[in-house]
Amino acid sequence: KTPDEVLEIIKTAFLPVPDRTETVPYTEAAGRVLAEDIRATEYVPAFNRSTVDGFAVKAKDTFGCSDSIPAILMNTKEILMGQAAGLVLTEGQCAPIPTGGEVPEGADAVQMVEFTEDYKDGTTGILKPVAPGHNIILKGDDVYPGKPVLTAGRKLTAQDVGALAAMGIMKVPVARRLKVAILSTGDELVPPEQTPGPGQIRDVNSSLLSALITQMGAVPVFYGIIPDQEELLSRHVEKAVQECDVILLSGGSSVGVKDPACRIIE
């Protein structure tokens, strides 16, 4: 059979895995599979923010200005980082503002400091006009309450964790990791740290499978190297069936007397 045909047989043979979820801190959510849709519960950003260092203005006050004919505006209170703007900008005024600062009510644009001139008399010259919304990120530009942000089934990335933090979501519903049993069988196998004797080989498959399982987001459970003894292997398989969601048997799958895996599965 082709690899695709074999995969189809495996898929149809699988029993449904019970729906199991758990809640983890957002700091531990990277690499986990989201179990439920996540919707925003607040605005991000939570206020109109300046994207540059400069002056908050009413855009119409700057229309038609230039280097030779600046718009001269009266300075108001400086807006400080991490604090509410605390003022209402009126016509003919401007307010110094840092990158990330809250744009005050009444302002609808921010001009970069590079396009201004301080006249040292309480006024500032705006040397280049701005349109409404210039250099401003509006409240809720990123997300707003009710907006779908992350969908169930998504494998969460580092960027997703950042988004969760931005929204203040501290607990995340994720799918519980599948436990995958690994059983290596064969009288010829020895652990990787052991030097093989005559007729022996190191057990490579269990290490490879364990790494692949971890890489795919599941939890590997190694049941050790099991000799070619049908009763012993059967006991280990029965134990693994009780404790794990998926069983991987490496070896013992031929039709020889010393290959009992197929008989045990049947």
Image (cartoon, rainbow, N blue to C red):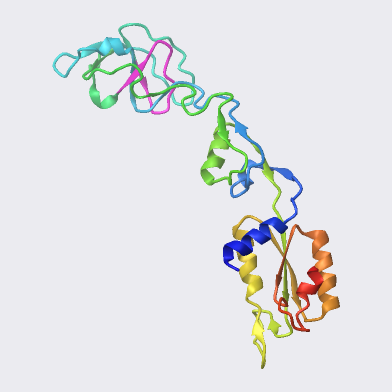
Q: Is residue 101 left or right of residue 69?
A: right
Relative height, residue 246 to residue 52 (above, below): below
* In the foreground, 203 or 261: 261
Q: Which residue is rendered at x = 54% and y = 41% of the image?
A: 160
Q: Where on the picture, by quarter, is residue 153?
A: top right
Tell me where residue 193 appears, x and y as whole percent. 65, 80
When the figure is inspected, residue 143 is found, relative to residue 240, above or below; the finding is: above
- 129 vs 256, left or right, is left
Q: Is residue 1 above or below residue 217?
A: below
Quadrant of the rendered image containing residue 215: bottom right
Q: Nearer the viewer, residue 182 or 266?
A: 266
Q: Is residue 197 above or below residue 240?
A: below
Q: Is residue 106 magenta?
A: yes
Quarter of the rendering occupied by the C terminus:
bottom right
Residue at figure coordinates x 37%, y 15% from the top left: 108
**Image check: 160 left or right of 91?**
right
Considering depth in this image, is 190 or 115 the residue closer to the camera?
A: 190
Give the percent coordinates (x, y) of residue 111. 30, 21
Q: Which residues are magenta?
A: 95-111
> How far from the left and from the top, in percent, is residue 225?
74, 77
Q: Is residue 46 rendered magenta in the image?
A: no
Identify the image quadrant of residue 21. top right
* Quadrant of the image containing the N terminus: bottom right
In the image, farthest residue toward the left: 68
Q: Position of residue 107 (x, y in %)?
A: 38, 13
Tell me which secondary structure the magenta stretch mostly adopts.
Answer: loop
| Residue at the extreme front | 1
Does residue 144 appear left or right of residue 112 in this picture? right
